[in-house]
Image (tube, rainbow, N blue to C red):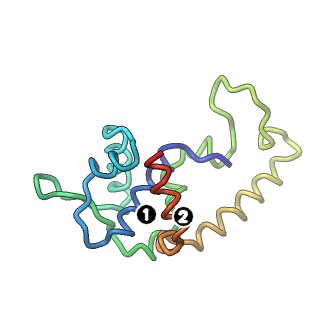
Amino acid sequence: MRLSLRTDYAFRVLIHLAANPDTRVTIRAISTLHRISHNHLMKVVHHLCLCGLVTGTRGRTGGIHLAMPPGHIMVGHVIRVMETQGEFMAGHAPSGDSRFLAADARPLRHLTARAMDAFMAVLEDMSIQDLVGSPELVRSVCAAGAA
């Protein structure tokens, strides 16, 4: 499975907000820290707001924060709301990509569907709080932004 940059950025935002619950966090600060396009990150945060995962306050003293405790935001849910259903769940390559995908082979479709369901079931039991509780993950997210 391959997650989009949009989903990667969403996790960076959610992990950053969960790790800094009492801090006013701006999109600009996260985009600078992770070297992500500010405009692209604004679109990701907007989508997270529409999905009810993040809330924001505009203006000079504004910022973003989690809309609920990080223990209530499940990793599987984030993936489902951020990924394009057709490409992620079916496992199809983007148009023009001629590489073979196992999900495209008729005899393997039921196996890949079962594997994806099992994979997502594991992720539905893992929360953003679980990710923040992993110092290695938080370090790798911060290091990836600094790279």
The residue drawn where x is 69% and y is 43% is 91
Q: Mark 1 belongs to which amino acid?
A: Ile
Give the x, y percent position of residue 88: 62, 46
Helix or strand or loop: what does disc 1 sit on?
helix
Give the x, y percent position of residue 50: 34, 54
Taking 20 as reference, is 40 above or below it? above
The residue drawn where x is 49% and y is 59% is 78
Give the left or right position of residue 124, taking residue 114 as reference.
left
Q: Mark 2 belongs to which amino acid?
A: Leu
Give the x, y percent position of residue 56: 24, 58
Give the x, y percent position of residue 8: 50, 50
The residue drawn where x is 26% and y is 59% is 25
Helix or strand or loop: what does disc 2 sit on?
helix
Q: Which residue is mark 1?
A: 15
- Circle 2 packing at 10 Å, graded few (<14), some (14-19), many (20+), is few
Toward the top, the furthest residue is 96
Q: Which residue is mark 2?
A: 137
Q: Mark 1 and mark 2 in contact (Cβ < 8 Å)?
A: yes
The Cα–Cα distance between marks 2 and 1, rounded to whole angstroms, is: 9 Å
> Which numbered disc, 2 or 1, marks the residue that appears first in the sequence?
1
The residue drawn where x is 59% and y is 74% is 125
Front residue of this view, candidates 47 and 25: 25
Q: How many marks?
A: 2
Give the left or right position of residue 59, taking residue 94 as reference.
left
Q: Nearer the viewer, mark 2 or mark 1?
A: 2
